[in-house]
Amino acid sequence: MKKYLFAFFCILQGHIFAQLSGVVIDKESKVVISQVSVKSSENEKVETNSYGTFIIPVKKLPVTLYFQKKGFEVDSIRIQQLGYVNMSLAVLSQDVKTVVVTSGKRNQNIEEIPISIEILKPALIANKGFTNLEQAVNQSPGVFTMDGQVSIRGGGGYAYGAGSRVMLLWNGIPMLSPDVGDVKWNAVPMEQASQIEILKGASSVLYGSGALNGIIALTEKEAKPEGQLTMKYQSGVYGDPKRSSMTWWNRNPTSHLLDVYYGKSKGRLGYTIGVNGLIDEGYREGNDEKRARINGSLYYFPKKYPKMKLGMSYQFQWQDKGVFILWKNDSMGYQALENTLSRQRAIRLNVDPYLKFIDKHDNKHYLRTRYYLVTTGNSDKVYDASFAEMYYADYNIQKKIGNTNLISGFMNMTNKVTSYVFDNHLSNNLALYEQVEMKLKKLDLTAGLRLEFCQLDKSKPETQFVISDKFTSPVYPIFRLGTHYAINKASHLRASFGQGIRFPSVAERYISASVGSVRIFRNPDLRPETGWNSEIGWKQILKFGKWMGMIDVAGFVNQYSNMTEFSFGVYKPDTMAFLQTSNPNAINYLYNWVGFQAQNAEKARITGLEFSFNSSGKIGNVEVVSLLGYTYMNPISLNNDPIYRASFSDTSTNMLKYRFNHLAKADVQASYKKWSIGGSMRYNSFMKNIDRAFEVGVLGTELLVGMQHYRQQYNKGVFVFDARLSYELKKGIKLNFIANNFLNAEYASRPGDLQAPRNFTLQLQYDL
């Protein structure tokens, strides 16, 4: 009898061990929540009862529990040992309680951030039919893209071959090319991103060179226990331009895109995988593109170290595209100027091992690394022009002491460039950084410091900081200050000041090329750009029934020194005594040394105001989602050198080249039952100043044929309208019809670069 009792006792003990119990409550009201779905990483699933309690079977520990209920934020908790689980869920505030990571390298509510930030959600990206990230970020208030270069609040203009003043982050790691220092927009796997965060203003303290004008950050989706499969296929056609002289085709060009993503976690293991393929015939002759990409991630929680996460993300892309630079003339803008069209084959590869660990004192340790390869080649080989590699590592520790968060870190980045165009170069960039975030009831204070060292080849460090006439430091300091004050739960004030620095890319220093009749000369003596940003802002949260919105108003000042511009002039070598015009075959022939060169020509100040409004929720039975914004900018040059000012197309104004005074964006979508309709608008005022050489030519030769006449005719600014209509065929399957630029506006993002005419896309989305 004792033997049976012992066996029964053992079974009972095993049964008890194999169960977890707990309660789920509302985080704000502390009221219990019934019918919450509770799912374990072992795929067990239960619901809370009318008392908010649950019991779920467990095979082994540790185990992760996921909590989900409509109207509340999805949350999870990792259980290391048996005990009663107390879980609280926050009410879902229709995207108002948006969590961002970029500002402080940790999760924060968007209203607590002391700097302006916009969020683009995956639904907008998918529903608009974008084929690359550049098109997506161009929807954000205050942001403008032109031919691969991005400007936030007027902080950047346009210069062929120049590096980016805006940092691109993928999973918290910089993703600017090692040779050119630009963003490879088509190599970013948007289909795998959870959201896009756009920070406005200098952000170099945590992320270093390249964040002079702001940050665009994407973070990949986390794999879910139930698994997630999404697919998107779309086919589009370019319509005829408004002017028949622009049409170069016999058959309208088409575009086809396929995206597939799958992610799943089970126990201590999780993985994601995505594929992307594009065939775009292009609306400009010879500007077609083909690409294929595979990307994904893998992570693991070691059994012996349950508070450690090991993982790796990866991506490989092949592409073949035509590179269009200058138009033929103002009547044939979709055809290239003779000898300016080129073919480019290239690969993009990144492998990102990482480690996250929580020690016994609850300090969080992060180690992020990346190998990033960017090649540029011709139709024969993918690396003929450049083979550029980046080796990156960033370690930081996050410690919480009372109401204070401390972030301390170290970064090392090595860029190795092997190039027929730029020669061979090696650069090293080291940095130490510290950020302190203190919470004092309703007041949040942020202060940060970064010490930056950068050296190209074996030259003098680029980070020379002048302390006095006799002393310089090889380390350049960068500071950041910010404050946020919560007047109440719905009203928030903020103010910030941040410095930034950007080191010239290898391409900016060493490019030597000809594009048609335009020559570009190298300048090894180019210096780093520096600047600062200051703003004050107010954020107001609104709520009416099931609809919520967020109003944001900000005033800002950006100031930059040593800004890089490709300036027109005569650039003969110092070793050449004189130039002559009589013998065109001689090396010292004048026209051989006339062209553009990267120069630290500009000192600038940009002041302005920005208003944005985001909302989502139901008004009656209609769900409405909106993103609207208007930015006023006054971008002026502080360089009064008459020779430099003579390079402006309009010398009567000191407005910076390739900038606007007014920028407006709007996107609104309404959904009723299975139908959705949406529309968007983009507006920019007239670009008053460009390089004078593009209007009047050089030495009797027009660089951009018809540009002066075109700008005189199209001088009123541009409105572009898009529309979309969708129908849910069944749960998880949606059919979209998209009409971009449906009024068929003719416009250019920069001189000689006309944008797409009216085009139509049919899209099928699948989400399971």
Image (cartoon, rainbow, N blue to C red):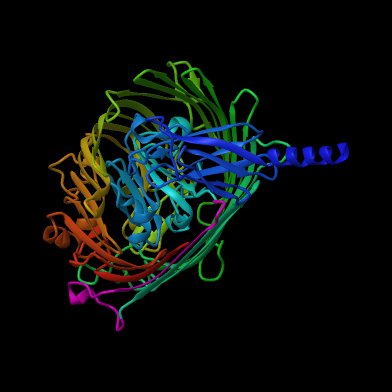
Quarter occupied by the N terminus: top right
Magenta stretch encompasses residue 469 = no
Q: Residue at x 18, y 64 (%)?
A: 745
Residue 714 x, y percent position in the rendering: 14, 59
Q: Is residue 33 above or below residue 161?
A: above
User: In this figure, what is the number of numbered marks?
Assistant: 0
Residue 476 x, y percent position in the rendering: 47, 26
6 displayed left or right of 444: right
The answer to which quarter of the image holds residue 146 is bottom left
Q: Residue furthest bottom?
A: 250
Q: Is residue 232 above or below residue 461?
A: below
Q: Nearer the viewer, residue 730 or 48?
A: 48
Q: Residue at x 38, y 59 (%)?
A: 126
Residue 592 x, y percent position in the rendering: 37, 57
Q: Is residue 316 visible?
A: no
Q: Residue furthest front?
A: 1
The answer to which quarter of the image holds residue 125 is bottom left
Q: Nearer the viewer, residue 733 or 206?
A: 733
Q: Residue at x 42, y 38 (%)?
A: 100
Q: Is residue 767 above or below residue 361?
A: below
Q: Which residues are magenta?
A: 224-251
Q: Nearer the viewer, residue 129 or 588?
A: 129
Q: Is residue 365 visible?
A: yes
Magenta stretch encompasses residue 237 = yes
Q: Is residue 13 above or below residue 371?
A: above
Residue 43 x, y percent position in the rendering: 60, 52
